[in-house]
Image (cartoon, rainbow, N blue to C red):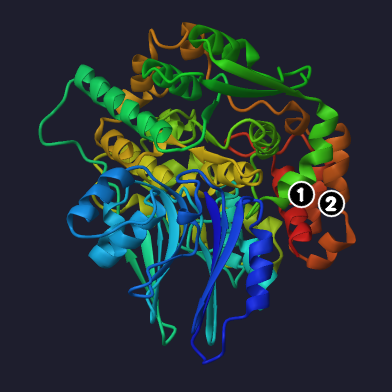
Amino acid sequence: MCGIAGEFRFDETPPDAAAMARMLAKLARRGPDAEGQHADGAVRLGHRRLAIIDLSEKSAQPMLDAETGTALVFNGTIYNYPELRAELIALGHAFRSDGDTEVILRAYLEWGEACVERLHGMFAFAIWNRDTLFLARDRLGIKPLYYNETPGRFRFASTPQALLAAGGVDTGLDAVALHHLFTLHAVVPAPRTIYAGIRKLAPGTTLTVNARGELHHRRYWSLKAERPALARTEAEWTAAIHDSLRQAVKKRIEIADVKVGVLLSGGLDSSLLVALLAEQGVPDLMTFSVGFEDQPEERGSEFEYSDPVAAMYGTRHHKYLIPNADVLKRLPEAVAQMSEPMFAQDAVAFYLLAEQVSQTVKVVQSGQGADEVFGGYFWYPRMAAETQGSALDRFRKHYFDRDHDEFLDMIQPAFHGGDYTGELVAAHLAEPFADEFIDQVLRMDTTMLITDDPVKRVDNMTMAWGLEARVPFLDHQLVELAAAMPPALKLRSEGKHVLKTVARGLVPDAVIDRKKGYFPMPALKYVRGNFLDFMRDILNSQACRERGLYHRAYVDRLLDAPESHHTRIQGSKLWHLALTEYWLQMHA
């Protein structure tokens, strides 16, 4: 894991070395182990390193092939790099390092832009080959890649904040992105971001930039959700999923030259990861859990579920109990690490947990993606039960935070427009190669919505502490297999039926049979006391009023009844407004 940045000039002006220094300074927390730069005519590449594989200087970046002048900066991990390395050696390539970085470089030299289709892992990288800049992002968007283009110049970086630090970015707010943000609980799908001048590369996509400043996107991967020609029984599906998940976990523990732990929340997904790692004989397995103080309405930790799992497998378990007073006090730090606004209140939980975990290990496995891939959320059965209306209608009714009319009531006329989110979702649901409505929904969730919600959140909050998070449930081969499985095997048993079947006997029954939970954050979940005061101060601030983003009547209506305005999936509408404004103030 690392932070990457670069600048490509088309106007015969040298790339700005000072701007690169500012970008790398913003990326330092993502790569605390080393820094490097490479300049070659119209391009300058920068890298901040978190050393995970081949800890020697031989894998330092930017990595250069001296013979061709081709240079690479890379963020991520390639799990099949040993196999690719052997194949490339057989084709005549000589390696000077033992890591995955050089494998990408030589794969590009051998297969060109098609190299991405051979990579199995999470990645965002840029390759310079003297006259062209080639950028790529992994199939499911686990690793981020943002860019900014202006006349005469193209810049890219792992975070928007690095691009902002470089300067020259149009920071006007994107009206379409705002519609997505407040409709899809903070998800702004690629290529947009909240800033008009910053875009992001879509998952499963490459981008080629030539010396004339022309950009060419190519989608190299898409997900099909169709039944196989040869039908499988439930037992066969379960066995196939179990084997594929076992392989996904194994790859993510073997490909590292440092210790790997597990973020153990007490839910089914992370508990199953622990079981599968123990099943493979991983020695000295380390697990990490975080909890918070209780509120009258809710327990603040899931230790009652995570403790038995740790005990069952004899892990070296680490528990951290965070006082409520620390949650609000340290919320500004977490917001500062958000590449884009994030409404999920567990972002601060991941931030505080990652701080502690990073003192013990540099890599963790985490359970993100299981709910989206295997149908674990409560709204999926509700959507499936709907029989009236279009696919968009069935989805909107149970998912959208605000319908279009309410968005217009909330936002100032300068940001009014069409129902952009409805149009986007309808188009994604209508894409071919999905057999049933729930196939369409889960495919869209897995390939678009998850990228800019839990996946981005975990990347941001772990990398803020130089901690790499690996997500086996988003192994693309496992995702492809699960997408072909009948939705009924996912939605049965109140969701994730096939995973519950796999887990039976490996995980305590209490964990499997518990009601679906969410990361408990009572101090931020209940809109009262200091938390309410915090939001009121933000929304009544002079900066907020002068920004002119919200209708004051809408803000006042929410402040008058702060615990009464919830989205369809039980988010706080007041928090949405406050977090967005606070993020804009922090990243101005």
Q: Quadrant of residue 572?
A: top right
Query: Which residue corresponds to the image point at 36% horizontal and 29% vertical from the top-left?
Result: 250
Query: Which residue corresponds to the image point at 59% horizontal and 73% vertical from the top-left?
Result: 197
Query: Which residue corresponds to the image point at 74% horizontal and 18% vertical from the top-left?
Result: 297
Residue 480 as seen in the image, left or right of residue 521: left
316 and 518: which is toward the camera: 316
Rendered-image quadrant of the C terminus? bottom right
* Residue 534 percent location from the top left of the image: 85, 43
Determine crowd level at label 1: few under 14, some 14-19, many 20+ residues with C-alpha closer than 10 A.
many
Residue 533 as seen in the image, left or right of residue 158: right
Q: Circles 1 and 2: CB distance less than 8 Å?
A: yes
* Residue 507 percent location from the top left of the image: 45, 11
Q: Amino acid at mark 1?
A: Ala
Query: Which residue corresponds to the image point at 63% horizontal and 77% vertical from the top-left?
Result: 17
Which dot marks residue 578? 1
* Residue 450 percent location from the top left of the image: 48, 44
Residue at which label 2 appears: 538
Which mark sits nearer the N-terminus, 1 or 2? 2
* Residue 206 percent location from the top left of the image: 37, 64
Residue 550 visible somewhere in the drawing: no
Determine crowd level at label 2: few under 14, some 14-19, many 20+ residues with C-alpha closer than 10 A.
many
